[in-house]
Amino acid sequence: MQCLRLGSLPELYQKAVHQQATGQPETSTRNLREQLLAIGKRFGVDIPLDRPEAEIMLCVPRTDIEHYPGAVAALAQVMQYLDRRCTFRSDALVAENYGYYAGSKAWQRDISLRFDRAGTRCKASILLVPECGHAYAALRWERPNCTVSPSPQSSSGHRIPCRRAAGGPPETSSCRLGATTFQDPCESARKGGINHAPRS
């Protein structure tokens, strides 16, 4: 059983409705696009943003943009090191799904479909989802239950790519990246204070 503070549900619903309409749960003091570019400048890394074509579309938690910018820079650096064509999309950037939080299938569907449309526009075949529990669950597992037709592009999270064969259903396959390790930075960093690199 969970205890909810009185007045918390209306705020949650407001965020879900705002994200359904705009792509982010609330208006930031600074434009998220500008914040991404500022992160690139601060950490000396190229932030791929709104590129017309990419193999991988990236999304991040809003918390990382505003409070943990090093995580965003690290993601861009990893993509550069792997030499993958990728992009953030300012029209589908925030990974959190407040419709999922609020328990509304309609809001959740509309927020998830924003990623599908953005991925189609940039011809991405993989959506890289951060290790943020509800964002991953909403985009990887719940999205098929909310959509009528198959997603036009694939999704990826926790290093598990889900590729869609031409004309067929999504197929899950394991990555071939050699030695890998798993870490849930959402829990480890936010609640546990563990910010160093994980050990394999």
Image: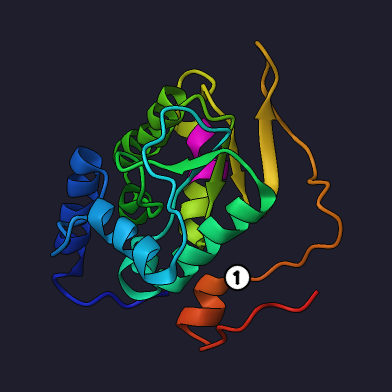
Which quarter of the picture shows residue 172?
Answer: top right
Vertical relation: 137 (above or below) 40? above
* Residue 164 to residue 168: above or below: below
Q: Is residue 177 magenta?
A: no
Using the image as rendered, state which of residue 170 and residue 68 is in the foreground: 68
The overriding secondary structure of the stretch rendered in magenta is helix
Q: Nearer the viewer, residue 185 or 79?
A: 79
Which residue is the extreme one toward the right?
178
Residue at point 16%, 74% (across, down):
6
Check disc 1 and give the amino acid type. Answer: Asp
- The span picked out in magenta is 139-144
Q: Residue at x 36, y 47 (%)?
A: 93
Residue closest to the eye, 4 or 64:
64
In-image side of 7 versus 77 (left or right): left
Q: Could one spot residue 129 in this view of the protein?
A: yes
As drawn, 10 above or below 58 = below
Which of the 4 image quadrants contains residue 70? bottom left
Q: Position of residue 160 (x, y in %)?
A: 70, 47
- On the picture, is 131 further left or further right than 120? right
Residue 71: give x, y in percent of width and height.
48, 69
The picture places residue 98, in percent across and down from the top left corner, at 31, 53
The extreme bottom residue here reads 193
Q: SS of the residue at dot 1?
A: loop
Disc 1 marks which residue? 184
Which quadrant of the figure contains the N terminus? bottom left
Please report the residue visible at 48 percent of the width from the left and 84 percent of the height from the top.
Answer: 191
Residue 12 sits above or below residue 174 on the image: below
